[in-house]
Amino acid sequence: MNKVNTSRFKDKAFRRLGMVVTVSCLLILAVFVGFVLYMGLDRLSWEFLMSLPSRFADQSGIYTAWIGSIWVLVLTTLISFPLGVGAGIYLEEYGKKNKLATFLEINIANLAGVPSIIYGLLGLEVFVRIMQMGNSILAGALTLALLILPIIIVSTRESLRAVPSSIRDASNALGASKWQTIWNQVLPASFGGILTGVILALSRAVGETAPLIVVGALAYVPFAPRGPLDEFTVLPIQIFNWVSRPQHEFVINAAAAIIVLLLITFVMNGIAVYLRNRWQSKMKW
Amino acid sequence: MVKQYAALFLLSGLFLTSCGSGGSDTKEIQIDGSSTVFPITEAVAEEFRAEAPDTRVTVGVSGTGGGFQKFLRGETDINDASREIKPSEIKTAEEKGVDYVRLSVAYDGLAVVVNPENDWVDHFTVDELKKIWEPSAQGEINRWSDVREDWPDEELHLFGPGVASGTYDYFTEAIVGESGSSRGDFTASEDDNVLVQGVSTDQYSLGFFGLAYFEENADKLRLVPVVNDQGNPVEPSLETVSNGSYNPLSRPLFIYVSKQAAQRQSVQQFVNFYLDEAPMLSKQIGYVPMPDSAYAAQKEKFRKFSAATDSVSAN
């Protein structure tokens, strides 16, 4: 009887603990978002979005920063999506389960934990210098693509693994080739999960600062990029730059820019949720 | 649906192969380097847009050292520097055959201030400041009498800029010996008015901030002389900052211009514009401008450097 009481107590205690932890996480987020909105919402305007950086806080805007962020985001997507998903498919569906595969698997998992600045150094040497791309958007996007590739590969493999093997067996039994099975059955079934992983990884990329500074993203760029080989700046760098100014008005600017960055991230996460739901409800065997 | 994504695969491939080349426009000026000098360079670049709208000036913040690396590889035209070029960097410059000129543009000075009613502090030594501000002082140095025995046995209240500011980095580097390392229990604010307010209303307070902010509030605060490397207590002023006798709390800020860049007309125009506007702009931003004659001398130095065809370093 006593034992039962103890486990009941433990059960209750754990539930309470879980609740406290969850609520405090949400609370911290709410306080953060609330604080940023309180500080920056008044500053946010069409003019702020369309103005160039300036030493006068009230004339300063984030035009080049958000255009730069979008450029980087689009290029990073174009580069990392095919590479990451392709590698995931190969490793999961084609790759043989031998020592090399284990070795690759461990390394990909490790790569996901490498600090982002290291990717920046790699990007600086390989893309900026050896491949002579200079401080371009392309070099920045390639670096960020490398940074998020492990995440995309791992999440792609997880999604592929979630497809029941009976589906593959059934497809094979009907005489479909491996490619037909993957293309017509496995991929459609797992695409929601894959896309979610890709978009979450991109959300991380859009907030990165350190690797881009190393690769040569700039703090003051008074023009919008015209192509992938132009110099650029991104929102996190503009925010970082403003926050480190002593004048309070710049900190308010930073708060307004953070709101824009948060909006971009929220919209992306929203798309991820939407796509996942869509694919999940559509796929029925 | 999947077919559309397949098209995306193909498109991205096409896209990547199509970006192979890109010419460099001589109307571009690439600047990188110190985040301390950045605000001045940014302001100059901003003003320069009106002067030469078709010249594209970009400014990065890789730090003085990171900036020099790029500068010495010929990747940038101008490097912002909050210190002089190091011997190891000079060696790299010689190996790479990069010739450059160093131009002073302004001073970064810090003021140590107390309340005007504070009648016991005559000066600080660097060691005393270190004793007050180093990380181990927290919980140890809490009263004025802990610093010097004959000072009043009253609580010491500290005010300083927020830890994200360059001013804080510089102060801790010059006083504690390690950038970004100090005690944590002081009133920190990015808003210098808060610091002025704090020190001016509290007799037992001590604070530091950029010298330019002191000048605007000179009537509410008292400047404290700091003993320099020659053993003399020196009060910061335009004169003592610019002749270097107020140290270690003041430092000159530089831009380095490469020979290759200096021969381009757009760069010449920009550098001259920089030296013309620096007195007004550096003050606006919170730094100490040099005397007018010094700017004239820098212009002359640059003129000679850009005109000289031999590659003797005009440093």
Image (spheres, grey):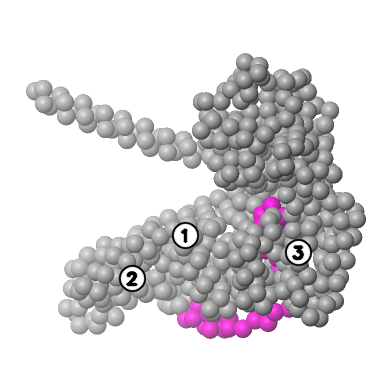
Query: Is A50 or A135 nearer to us in this picture?
Result: A135
Q: Are marks 1 and 3 on the same chain?
A: no
Tag 3 near tag 2, CB within 8 Å: no
Position above or below: B263 against B144: below
Tag 1 near tag 3, CB within 8 Å: no
| Residue B310 horizontal/vertical position (percent) | 79, 80
Q: Nearer the viewer, mark 1 or mark 3?
A: 3
Callout 2: residue from which chain?
A
The residue type indicated by label 1 comes to Ser
Q: Around disc 2, counting alpha carbons within 10 Å, would you say few (fewer than 14), some (14 to 19), or many (20 or more)?
A: many
Magenta-drawn segment: B10-38
**Mark 1 secondary-structure assignment:** helix
The residue type indicated by label 3 comes to Arg
Q: Is residue B33 magenta?
A: yes
Which residue was labeled with disc 1?
A116
Q: Quadrant of the C terminus of chain A?
A: bottom left
How far is disc 3 from disc 2 in space, using C-alphas?
A: 52 Å
**Mark 3 secondary-structure assignment:** strand
Which residue does the image show at 29% across and 70% down from the upper left? A104
Q: Around disc 1, counting alpha carbons within 10 Å, would you say few (fewer than 14), some (14 to 19), or many (20 or more)?
A: many
Left/right placement of residue A118 relative to residue A44 reads left
Which residue was labeled with disc 2?
A88
Callout 1: residue from which chain?
A
The residue type indicated by label 2 comes to Gly
Q: Is residue B258 magenta?
A: no
Query: Is A124 or A267 nearer to us in this picture?
Result: A124
Position above or below: B183 against B174: above
Which residue does the image show at 91% across and 55% down from the upper left? B293
Which residue was labeled with disc 3?
B102
Callout 3: residue from which chain?
B
